[in-house]
Amino acid sequence: MKVEADLDLCQGHAMCSMEAPDVFTVPRHGTVEILLADVPDDLRGDVENAVRYCPTRALRIIED
Ligand code: SF4
């Protein structure tokens, strides 16, 4: 699976990096950066939580 961020929607709340710190990082005054282009299976749950809790719904999972 892959995960994609819509940077027009992202407001840097950093919920995603709390849920899945191996996959997302958010600079203090910026938008999300995706650290892993391909998400390993053992991080799927973390990424699903990040998508669910992103307040602006900026994240989207893309199944392979
Ligand atoms: S939780 Fe959503 S709005 Fe916040 S940094 Fe992550 S992608 Fe952006």
Image: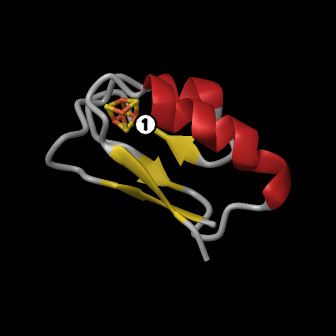
Residue at 46 percent across and 23 percent down: it is 53
Residue at 35 percent across and 27 percent down: it is 28
**Mark 1 near ligand 1 (CB under 8 Å)?**
yes
Q: Is residue 46 visible?
A: yes
- 48 is higher (above) or lower (below) than 37: above
The location of residue 35, given as percent across then percent down, is 57, 57
Residue at 61 percent across and 77 percent down: it is 64
- 48 is higher (above) or lower (below) than 23: above
Front residue of 31/52: it is 52
Which residue in the rendered view is the most extreme toward the right? 42
Q: Is residue 21 visible?
A: no
- 25 is higher (above) or lower (below) than 6: above
User: At label 1, which amino acid type do we have?
Assistant: Val
The location of residue 1, given as percent across then percent down, is 63, 66
For disc 1, the marked residue is 26
Front residue of 29/56: it is 56
